[in-house]
């Protein structure tokens, strides 16, 4: 009886100080980069989330039954933007530490995930997939005639400075603030920054089209080259109009190619 | 002549980028501009990779992986087309806008094919997830969570093989392309700026910007003015 009491008291003491070590936090963050390795239509990122959290759950819950319960509660449906997921992973650890210390029950962590994954997915999709990625892509593609292969390097640097800084910061904010991470994300003002980036993407596309048409026209020696160069620009403008009217981009692309081949071959 | 080490390298790069695209990190190494330039670098033809990648970057710019929706597989189109372009150029001993055009026209459709493959591979991931739940219930937690990693290998193998096949096809087609009539080759060369302009227009739409036409038009006009001024001052571009 005494031994059992000592064990129980020791467990209680451990639980009162339950926190995840720095090394494990780093492991969780790195494993969260594999969040989508087994993305599936049923649970979506569930397996990835359980994989990322596992080292921390093992540390927080020494008892096998509690470990099983903890892993199982994170094998339920989960889906959000993969970068912003870092904030949720951090927030889940925040809650799991509190659960392990007996300061809250397991419903809180499930409610936290359910409440945040949708809105954060929308925020991440809007900023990263629909703003930063197209803007950096179009900007660096527009710089290919000037920077050549370095444009690809610039793409990686520009994008990933934002991407990894954001991902690590979100992880830390989630870990420190738990539910209050929403205020910190709101301060980042991502929608307004996204709108500026989208404008940069559009301008880069226009600039590149003009540059390519003129340079090709200038390098071709035939007398009709300026006409073909101007034709390329007109084809670009018409394509914009057609794609805006939901004509298949593949159809427009192949039509333009066929037209240019015919013009180049027979003029 | 087929250069087998290049075919193998193309497959390896294609497989790795397919994993990076969805399963690991998403640091955009798999974006067409980077993926195709990297392929060109590996196959000793940076120019082909770069110019194929530039057009495909613009063509696929607006695609996004939103929720459960699957976008076209821009990475497969880029690695496949650039591997084929390098194969064509390697066989002919010359990288030209005509070879870039031919590779793009022939392999841009891989974006759609890649989406179908992605959908099929999700079934395998579903089985892994179900297996992980069963293992967790039995208490085999390490094994359960490690199932996550097994989701990557079919992606690597399938997309790697398709990319290697593109590199092989490019090498095999190079003698035929070298024999094309000059007129057709000239037409193909002109298809490149035309496709680039169309891809740029698609990118402007894909930028999701409000007033995108206005921004694009203003930037194009500014470039025309600057270039005209440079040409008038006697500079060659």
Image: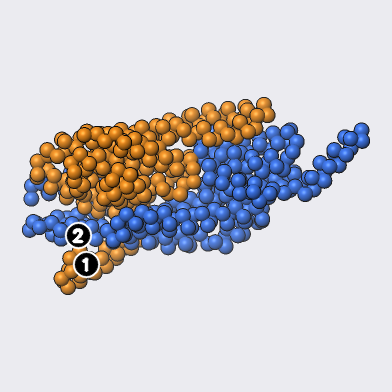
In this picture, residue A119 sits left or right of residue A70: left
Q: Residues within 10 Å of mark 2 (few under 14, many from 20)?
A: some
Q: Residue at x 29, y 64 (%)?
A: B219
Question: Residue B110: x, y in percent?
Answer: 32, 37
Q: Is residue B95 above or below residue B155?
A: below
Chain at numbered mark 1: B
Q: From this viewpoint, which residue is outermost toward the bottom? A: B233
Observer-nearest residue: A127 or A115?
A127
Q: Report which quarter residue B81 is drawn in.
A: top left
Q: Is A44 in front, or is B16?
A: B16
- Confirm whether circles 2 and 1 share one chain: no
Q: Colour of chain B?
A: orange
* Horizontal and vertical percent position of residue B234: 15, 71
CB contact under 8 Å: marks 2 and 1: yes
Q: Which residue is mark 1?
A: B227
Circle 2 sits on which residue?
A215
* Tally of numbered tags: 2
* Residue A25 appearing in the image: yes
Residue B168 appears at what percent x and percent y? 27, 34
Mark 1 neighbour class, 10 Å CA radius: few under 14, some 14 to 19, many 20 or more: some
- Viewer-closest of A134 and B230: B230
Q: Residue at x 29, y 49 (%)?
A: B46
Query: Colour mode?
Result: by chain
Please name the residue shown 32% across and 54% down the image: A149
Q: Quadrant of the N terminus of chain A?
A: top right
Chain A drawing hue: blue
Q: Is residue A205 visible to us here? A: no
């Amino acid at each position: 009886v005494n031994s059992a009491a000592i064990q129980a008291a020791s467990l209680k003491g451990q639980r009162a100080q339950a926190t995840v070590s720095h090394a494990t936090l780093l492991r969780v963050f790195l494993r969260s980069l594999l969040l989508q390795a087994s993305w599936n239509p049923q649970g979506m990122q569930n397996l990835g989330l359980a994989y990322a959290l596992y080292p921390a759950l093992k540390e927080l819950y020494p008892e096998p039954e509690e470990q099983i319960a903890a892993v199982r509660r994170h094998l339920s449906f989960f889906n959000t933007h993969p970068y912003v997921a870092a904030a949720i992973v951090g927030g889940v650890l925040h809650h799991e530490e509190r659960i392990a210390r007996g300061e809250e029950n397991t419903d809180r962590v499930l409610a936290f995930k359910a409440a945040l994954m949708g809105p954060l997915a929308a925020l991440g999709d809007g900023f990263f997939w629909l703003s930063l990625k197209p803007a950096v892509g179009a900007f660096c593609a527009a710089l290919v005639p000037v920077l050549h292969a370095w444009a690809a390097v610039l793409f990686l640097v520009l994008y990933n400075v934002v991407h990894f800084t954001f991902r690590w910061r979100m992880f830390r904010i989630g870990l420190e603030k738990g539910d209050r991470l929403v205020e910190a994300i709101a301060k980042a003002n991502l929608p307004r920054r996204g709108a500026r980036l989208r404008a940069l993407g559009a301008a880069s596309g226009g600039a590149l089209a003009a540059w390519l048409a003129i340079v090709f026209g200038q390098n071709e020696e035939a007398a009709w080259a300026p006409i073909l160069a101007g034709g390329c620009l007109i084809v670009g403008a018409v394509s914009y109009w057609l794609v805006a009217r939901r004509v298949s981009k593949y159809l427009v692309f192949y039509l333009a190619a066929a037209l240019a081949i015919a013009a180049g071959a027979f003029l | 002549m087929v250069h087998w080490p290049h075919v193998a390298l193309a497959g390896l790069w294609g497989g790795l980028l397919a994993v990076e695209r969805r399963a690991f990190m998403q640091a955009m190494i798999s974006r067409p501009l980077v993926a195709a330039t990297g392929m060109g670098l590996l196959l000793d033809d940076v120019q082909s990779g770069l110019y194929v990648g530039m057009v495909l970057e613009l063509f696929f710019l607006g695609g996004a992986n939103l929720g459960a929706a699957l976008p076209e597989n821009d990475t497969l189109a880029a690695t496949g087309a650039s591997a084929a372009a390098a194969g064509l150029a390697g066989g002919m001993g010359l990288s030209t806008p005509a070879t870039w055009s031919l590779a793009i026209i022939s392999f841009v459709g891989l974006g759609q094919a890649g989406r179908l493959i992605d959908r099929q591979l999700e079934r395998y991931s579903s089985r892994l997830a179900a297996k992980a739940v069963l293992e967790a219930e039995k208490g085999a937690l390490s094994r359960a969570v490690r199932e996550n990693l097994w989701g990557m290998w079919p992606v690597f193998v399938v997309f790697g093989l398709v990319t290697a096949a593109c590199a092989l096809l490019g090498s095999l087609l190079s003698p035929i392309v070298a024999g094309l009539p000059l007129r057709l080759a000239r037409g193909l060369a002109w298809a490149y700026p035309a496709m680039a302009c169309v891809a740029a227009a698609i990118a402007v739409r894909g930028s999701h910007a409000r007033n995108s036409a206005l921004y694009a038009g203003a930037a194009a006009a500014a470039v025309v003015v600057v270039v005209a001024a440079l040409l008038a001052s006697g500079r060659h571009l």
